[in-house]
Image (cartoon, rainbow, N blue to C red):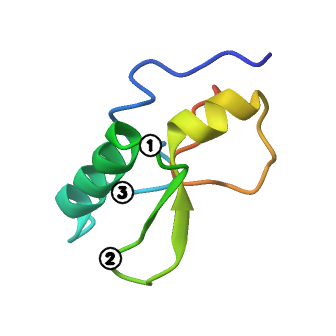
Amino acid sequence: MQQLRDQYLERPHPARLRRAHPLLDEIIGRHAGAIKDGQPCYQDPSTGLMVFTAAFLAERGYCCDSECRHCPFVID
């Protein structure tokens, strides 16, 4: 299994969601809510697309190289 990032459940992958994103707080809130409810994904507030949670991706056990927003793995 690949190494998990520090605070992967609380913070999106730093290279995949910029801190200045106008909906950052809402995205983090939706992600946290989905994890709390045991859901594998949540609906992105800006695009309407479904986004996998870090918990779901970590449970899967590997990085798929699709540049997931909440990828929990350390990527070189």
Q: Residue furthest bottom?
A: 47
Q: Can you see residue 76?
A: no
Q: Residue furthest front?
A: 37
Of the residues shown, which amino acid type is indicated by label 1?
Pro
Nearest-to-viewer mark from 3 and 2: 2
**Few, some or many C-alpha atoms within 10 Å of disc 3 (few <14, some 14-19, many ≥20)?**
few
Find disc 3 in the rendering and name its residue. 18
Tell me the residue at 23%/69% (across/down).
Answer: 23
Find disc 2 in the rendering and name its residue. 45
Of the residues shown, which amino acid type is indicated by label 3?
Arg
- The quarter of the picture where residue 10 lies is top left
Nearest-to-viewer mark from 2 and 1: 2
Whole-percent x and y of residue 18? 36, 57
Quadrant for the C terminus in the image: top right
Kindly report the distance in space between the C-alpha atoms of the residues bearing marks 3 and 2: 15 Å
Tell me the residue at 36%/44% (across/down).
Answer: 37
Contact flag, marks 3 and 2 (Cβ < 8 Å): no
| Res. 56 mark | none
Specify whether 3 is left or right of 12: right
Contact flag, marks 2 and 1 (Cβ < 8 Å): no
Kindly report the distance in space between the C-alpha atoms of the residues bearing marks 1 and 3: 7 Å
Label 1 residue SS: loop
Find disc 1 in the rendering and name its residue. 14
